[in-house]
Amino acid sequence: MFSDSAVVLNKVGNALIVTLQTTLTDEVLNQFQARILSKISEVKVSYIVCDLSGMELIDMEEYASITTSLKMAAVMGVKTIIVGLNPGVAAMIVDSDLDCDSFKYALNIEQGLSLAKQ
């Protein structure tokens, strides 16, 4: 496990589980991006399972920053599954017409890892 207080990284099989556990600030979002990109260049993974279950609220700019980081990982050959969205965040993403097509989604980490195995 690779962790600090804001971003937790766990490698499980061919997946890197990334969990955000704090209020999102520019510093946390920058750390999220740097740690993901650094870790996937060091450790062979095929998937990122991005767990956002700890986030009660995510605004459009925060979601855009998260997905931009995940798209950077995609350019490096890693697919992404976003898990743990609460109903309010899911509604905001769809209502705001934000990008939903670049990623797979699952209800929780277990379902996300199952998708990664398919």
Image: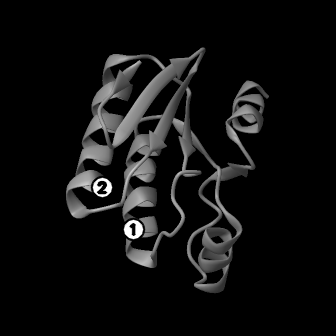
Q: Amino acid at mark 2?
A: Leu
What residue is pinned by disc 2?
29
Q: Position of residue 77 (x, y in %)?
A: 48, 34
Measured from the top left, where is residue 114 in percent x and y? Answer: 77, 30
Q: Earlier in the sequence, mark 1 or mark 2?
A: 2
Q: Quadrant of residue 14?
A: top right
Amino acid under label 1?
Answer: Glu
**Position above or below: 51 against 110:** below
How far apart are the alpha carbons under marks 1 and 2?
8 Å
Categorize mark 1 by other alpha carbons within 10 Å: few (<14), some (14-19), many (20+): some
Q: Residue 88, how many percent across, how many down?
A: 65, 74
Residue 113 in picture, x, y percent from top left: 70, 30
Residue on which the image places disc 1: 62
Q: Is residue 93 rendered to the left or right of residue 32?
A: right
| 100, 84: nearer the viewer | 84
Q: In the figure, residue 35 lies in which quadrant?
A: top left
Q: Quadrant of the N terminus?
A: top left
Q: Please name the colour scheme applied to the rendered image.
A: one colour
Q: Is 23 rendered above or below residue 118?
A: below
Left or right: 8 with respect to 108? left
- Decide: marks 1, 2 in contact (CB < 8 A)? yes
Question: Dot 1 lies on which element?
Answer: helix
Residue drawn at (23%, 62%) of the image: 26
* Picture residue at 35% right of the left edge, 22% below the top: 2
Q: Quadrant of the C terminus?
A: top right
Label 2 Cα crowd, 10 Å radius (few <14 / some 14-19 / many 20+): many
Tag of residue 90: none
Q: Residue at x 50, y 19 (%)?
A: 11
> Looking at the image, which is closer to me, 113 or 108?
108
Would you say 82 lies left or right of 44 here?
right
Q: Is residue 54 above or below residue 92?
A: above
